Image (spheres, coloured by chain):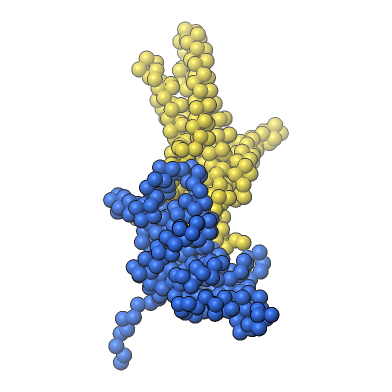
Chain colours: A blue, B yellow
Amino acid sequence: MTAPTTTLPPVLQLEHLVRHRAGRPAVRDLSLTLDRGQVLGLLGVNGAGKSTTLSMIAGALRPDSGAIRIHGEDFLEQPELAAQWLGWLPERAPLWPELTVSEHLTAHGRLRGLRGSALNEARTRIIDRLELQPLAQRLAGVLSQGQRQRLGLACALLHRPALLVLDEPANALDPVQVTALRALIREQAAAGTAVILSTHLLGEVTAVCDQVAILHEGTLRHHGPVHEGDHTALEHTFFSIAMNGNETNEKAHAA
Amino acid sequence: MSRALMDTMAVTRLELRRLFVRPLAWVLAALTLAWLGWSYTLLLGSFLSEQVRLAALPDGPGFTDMVTVPLLAQLVELAFLVVPLLTMSALAGERRSGTLPLLFSAGVPASRIVLGKYLAVLVWLLLWLALTLAMPLTLAHAIRLDWGKLAAATLGLVLLFAALAALGIACSAFASHQALAAAAALVLTLLLWTVNQGAQMAGVNDGAINWLAMSPHLRPLLHGLVSTVDLLWFVLLTVVALALATRRLAAEKGRD
């Protein structure tokens, strides 16, 4: 008889995910796992399937087949798990233009089941952390793109999710804000949050990610750890896959 | 509080907040209440000038028949336009602005999103009804009101608003653009209101097409006659429209 195992399941498990869009395969047979405190960078050219993958993880799109597990629970069967465990910043941070920054945080908190003092505390904490105090009473419709992105991030982090899904989070941020974002991602990972972020920027991956996954035409072509000073190797792998669909053919890139 | 109730209330509060900070709801309320106030003044003037003659009739119409019911009938006509304008952005607007996936990613099922938004619109409409009813009720201490008839007419209005709001939400769930949602809701409402007119002109007064129409179910309520069939008609329309909206929204995650 074997002793019962106490190993915690990964925060995120993708099992053979398939999704078609406009009649074409956008994601094909994608399997990945992500543990507590890990930061995974999802790379790929436009149309590689990054946003589709993240939308499925966030519960905004349903896969055609496959499974998504969060903490071992079937997310497709229990989408309400998202309320507690998942924070998502979609590309271009969609907001309600007629609501203020503070009202956004209140609405998101309520949608995540926060009430009363817990909601007030969470709102105050995230406003302080993302330095949104001067914007708190400003309407979302008049925010700059960078400010919108910060508000979107605040909404995603408000309820301390176990899994943070970021779709091109550095878009429209200035270099100072990008540095602050990297620090924030690292801080979240250190606190145990699993983070998955899609980006076009290889520097973003080498700066904050422990792992990298490269998608090409909806297929996972590379998945492995990111080592410090790995930028050139990663660049070769990325361009090789982007141009030839194969990470081993580096000669074509050099040519 | 159950999770379902918490989700629904969160969506309702969000939608109510959005309704009350947008100028559209305020402009609609101001314009329609001003129009209803003017109509009320005219109806009241007409009633007062006829009051002595009417009092002499053995079973003559009173204040409720002469003022309150005609006022509520005007509210019905205004609702045909106001409800589509209020509901058009509920889901079509969210879809266009990209905020609909945010609700899904918070783990809120389609049924609770639809119900939450529906309840918010209904709250606005009930406030609108209350403000309209306040006009005749200000004279309740001085004039004899037919409370039974007033209660039946109010019930009819509540049911009508419930059905029209559900229809508007369903149109907003199916339409890709807010204007299309409003136009579809308006056309469907007018169709439901008038679908039996051709049959009536042909002398058919009790066919299935007459049962389908809205007006034969609302008019008795406005005149104080409450029947289960009429109540069921409105409940059925409301449930079917909300079910269709939920089904359409749930399919959203599977669409391209």
x and y, in percent, of residue B35 in the image: 53, 23
Above or below, B52 relative to A168: above
Which residue appears at 37% of the width and 14% of the height? B142
Left or right: B192 in relation to A103: right
x and y, in percent, of residue B159 in the image: 48, 38
Q: Residue furthest bottom?
A: A1
Q: Quadrant of the C terminus of chain A?
A: bottom right
Above or below, A90 relative to B137: below
Asked if residue B210 can be seen in this view, the reply is: no
Which residue appears at 50% of the width and 75% of the height? A212
x and y, in percent, of residue B44 in the image: 48, 15
x and y, in percent, of residue B239 in the image: 50, 48
Asked if residue B85 can be seen in this view, the reply is: yes
Which residue appears at 56% of the width and 30% of the height? B78
Residue toward you, A161 or B156: A161
Which residue appears at 49% of the width and 53% of the height? A146
